[in-house]
Image (cartoon, rainbow, N blue to C red):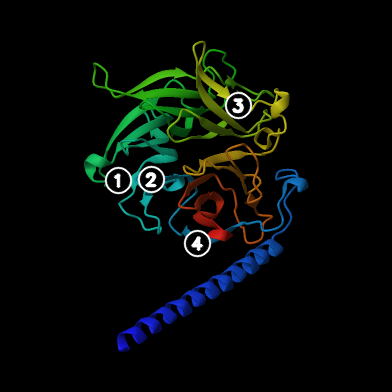
């Protein structure tokens, strides 16, 4: 009898606990909705010239990015940020002449690596870092250089890891390597910029294709070719590149996005996809405004950006984030090229970016180089907080 009574009390207790859980869920749901509405109500209107048309903005149940934390006090004009495949964060601390390695809590994990004016960084499948920076030649010229830092053989001790030269062009000292992205088959792409695009044969603005593979001499990095699919110089075509500022690749593919300043061009972000057929192998624009069926794609609206300085790609959702350093804003696009209403900038309540230049995406968090404020800012969607 006592045992039966105990079983009955335990059963009733489970019912009460279930009811309590259900009640708490309802309370949290109500709290969440009120919180979301509060953030929406505080948010100022978008700048309609750069963000979605009023008919595209979802105002009911919408979400926004809010500042989670920031890392400051140690950076001097940080230019580029990478969330690596090793789940560590790398920052090109440009005016401190170093690469900094941090964990997701913002703690520096290794003595930083001294490199002259680093401005771009990527990581390949070997967990090697590829860094665009500068070096001083024997003749005193300061030139652009791409470096490979081999972390794994040195147990991720960034300060002592072996560093090789991938590429430099001493005959063109004003060229710089502004973006790097790793693609398939041990290949990677490098965005190159400079002041002179007058040469038809070898203009400064190019996307260069490289391969990591040992040759007979033992050299592992080899130059393949500049991509002929992009046209160097000012112009109104979707494939005109004039002054590239950054480059990001999609995981496990050959697709990439290159950003550029808007000097002399209409499209400051170009999305290229790799295509291989019996008749063609190379890159084509994902969206082409000359195609009547694609003119209304948000991603290719002309003159959307004033200075697209950086691009970040969500590896899971494939959302795209474009940083505009002149508008102090970040535009978010989905994988179909539609501008999302979560896009934000200084016109958004609680945002104080100044000259941002790069963004990395991971674990539902945006890591933004707030360059002129000398810090890294972390943002999360209000629905994830």
Label 1: which secondary element: loop
For residue 324, say whether it is visible: no
Q: Residue 235 location in percent, x, y?
A: 68, 23
Is residue 84 toward the left or the right of residue 198 in the image? Answer: left
- The reply to whether discs 1 and 2 touch (Cβ–Cβ < 8 Å) is yes
Residue 99 numbered mark, or none: 2
The image quarter containing residue 214 is top left
Q: Considering only order in the chain, which callout, 2 or 3, is on the residue closer to the N terminus?
A: 2
Q: Considering only order in the chain, which callout, 4 or 2, is on the residue closer to the N terminus?
A: 4
Residue 158 numbered mark, or none: 1
Which residue: 68% across, 28% down?
Answer: 264
Label 4: which secondary element: strand
- The reply to whether discs 4 and 3 touch (Cβ–Cβ < 8 Å) is no
Residue 242 numbered mark, or none: 3
Tell me how far mark 3 sits from mark 2, CA to CA.
Answer: 28 Å
- The reply to whether discs 1 and 4 touch (Cβ–Cβ < 8 Å) is no
Q: Considering only order in the chain, which callout, 4 or 1, is on the residue closer to the N terminus?
A: 4
Residues packed near mark 2 inside 10 Å, few (<14), some (14 to 19) or many (20 plus): many
């Amino acid at each position: 009898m006592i045992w039966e009574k105990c079983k009955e009390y335990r059963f009733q207790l489970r019912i009460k606990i279930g009811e309590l859980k259900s009640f708490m869920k309802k309370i949290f749901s109500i709290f969440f909705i009120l919180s979301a509405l509060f953030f929406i109500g505080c948010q100022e209107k978008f700048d309609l010239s750069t963000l979605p048309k009023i008919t595209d903005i979802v105002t009911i149940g919408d979400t926004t990015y809010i500042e989670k934390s920031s890392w400051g006090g140690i950076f001097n004009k940080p230019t580029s940020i990478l969330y690596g495949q090793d789940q560590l964060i790398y920052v090109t601390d440009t005016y401190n002449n170093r690469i900094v390695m941090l964990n997701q809590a913002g703690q520096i994990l290794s003595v930083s690596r001294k490199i002259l004016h680093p401005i771009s960084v990527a990581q390949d499948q070997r967990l090697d870092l590829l860094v665009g920076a500068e070096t001083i030649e024997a003749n005193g010229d300061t030139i652009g250089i791409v470096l490979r830092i081999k972390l794994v053989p040195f147990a991720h001790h960034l300060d002592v890891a072996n560093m090789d030269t991938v590429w430099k062009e001493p005959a063109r000292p004003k060229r710089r390597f502004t973006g790097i992205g790793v693609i398939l088959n041990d290949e990677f792409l490098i965005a190159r910029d400079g002041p002179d695009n007058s040469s038809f044969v070898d203009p400064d603005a190019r996307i260069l294709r490289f391969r990591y593979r040992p040759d007979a001499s033992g050299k592992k990095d080899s130059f393949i070719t500049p991509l002929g699919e992009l046209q160097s110089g000012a112009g109104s075509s979707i494939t005109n590149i004039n002054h590239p500022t950054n480059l990001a690749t999609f995981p496990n593919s050959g697709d990439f996005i290159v950003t550029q300043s808007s000097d002399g061009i209409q499209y400051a972000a170009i999305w290229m996809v790799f295509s291989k057929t019996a008749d063609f192998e190379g890159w084509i624009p994902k969206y082409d405004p000359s195609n009547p069926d694609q003119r209304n794609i948000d991603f290719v609206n002309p003159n959307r950006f004033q200075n697209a300085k950086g691009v970040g790609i969500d590896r899971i959702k494939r959302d795209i984030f474009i940083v505009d350093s002149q508008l102090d804003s970040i535009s978010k696009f989905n994988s179909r090229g539609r501008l999302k209403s979560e896009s934000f900038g200084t016109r958004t309540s609680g945002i104080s970016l100044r000259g941002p230049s790069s963004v990395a995406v991971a674990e539902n968090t945006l890591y933004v180089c707030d360059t002129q404020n000398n810090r890294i800012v972390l943002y999360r969607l209000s629905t994830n907080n």
